[in-house]
Image: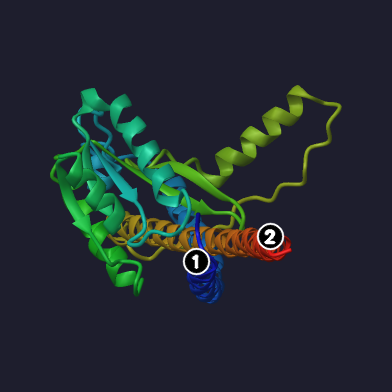
Amino acid sequence: MPTLLDYRRRIRSVRSTQQITKTMKMVAAARLRRAQERVFSARPYAQEILAVLRSLVSRIPALPAGGEEAVHPLLARRPEEKILVLVLTGDRGLCGAFNANVLRRAVEFLKEKEKRSPEIVAIGKKGRDYFRSHRRKMAEEYVNVFARLDYAQASQVAGRVIALYAEAKVDAVYAIYNEFKSILAQKLTTEKLLPIEEIPSARQEWVAGRARAEVRPETKPAPAENPVDYIYEQPAQELFNELVPRHLTTQIFRILLESAAAEHAARMTAMDAATSNAAELIDRITLEMNRARQATITREIIEIVSGAAALR
């Protein structure tokens, strides 16, 4: 049976752990605030660059000889015989099921695409260690990316992806990551990065919206405006050479920011739960210690009374 000294030592140990988890929660909350601001700033830019690319595609009168690949290699569409999977995990633990959920989804996805010779790009130390321990071949690995996340790191990852796709070493590129929704919720996402999905022009979307409204005449069509008539001075080839790689780099940078914010949110939630659990554990240990002390006092009183009765 534990002694009172053992109970006190255990309470001190749990209280020290509680102070650590509380501090980690505060640090994660401060980092989350900055990461959240960066995510909210990156999303509009990613949407706008897609809109510019959409506008440019809508103004190409006809594709040159060689199809989309002649315009830019990243627009080429090939049968998916070989795929590349970007798996984004954290560099550290203590963030609940954040890393486990991504790795579980990645394993399921790799099993589904096993016939397409999937290659892995591990971004994050946890994912790198997991695939190493399971002896999975990795095309690239990037660790300590989220310590100081910037656009240059996204450009490095995007450059490797662009090289593999342009050289026809892979036919499709996917990303598996946690998308930041709120402090309490992260959305596990599998997103296709390459080939870039067909981008309908704004005019085509407007015509499609009018057609849907004509099918249901009882619904009044929302007022739609004609697409803005931009004037591009550079030729289409030059514009695609600049916009398409930048679009891919921007999307990868946004994904990295989403994963970083989701990790901080998951760590903050996990440390908050750990702090609450430590407080409950301290209360339970204190109650057990008081019961043990009361039992000791009661036993000593009984011994004293029994000894006094024996002397009579």
Q: Position of residue 103 (x, y in %)?
A: 35, 42
Q: Residues within 10 Å of mark 2 (few under 14, many from 20)?
A: few
Residue 44 drawn above or below residue 97: below
Q: Which quarter of the picture shows residue 299? A: bottom right
Indicate which disc residue 10 carries. Answer: 1
Residue type, label 2: Ala
User: Foreground: 284 or 162?
Assistant: 284
User: Foreground: 118 or 146?
Assistant: 146
Instruction: Find the residue positioned furthest to the front.
Output: 312
For image coordinates 73% across by 61% down, the residue present is 309
The colour scheme is rainbow
Question: SS class of the residue under badge 2?
Answer: helix
Distance between mark 2 and mark 1 Cα atoms: 39 Å
Left or right of residue 113, residue 230 in this image = right
Figure quadrant of the C terminus: bottom right
For image coordinates 33% across by 60% down, the residue present is 249
User: Foreground: 283 or 287?
Assistant: 287
Name the residue tied to disc 2.
310
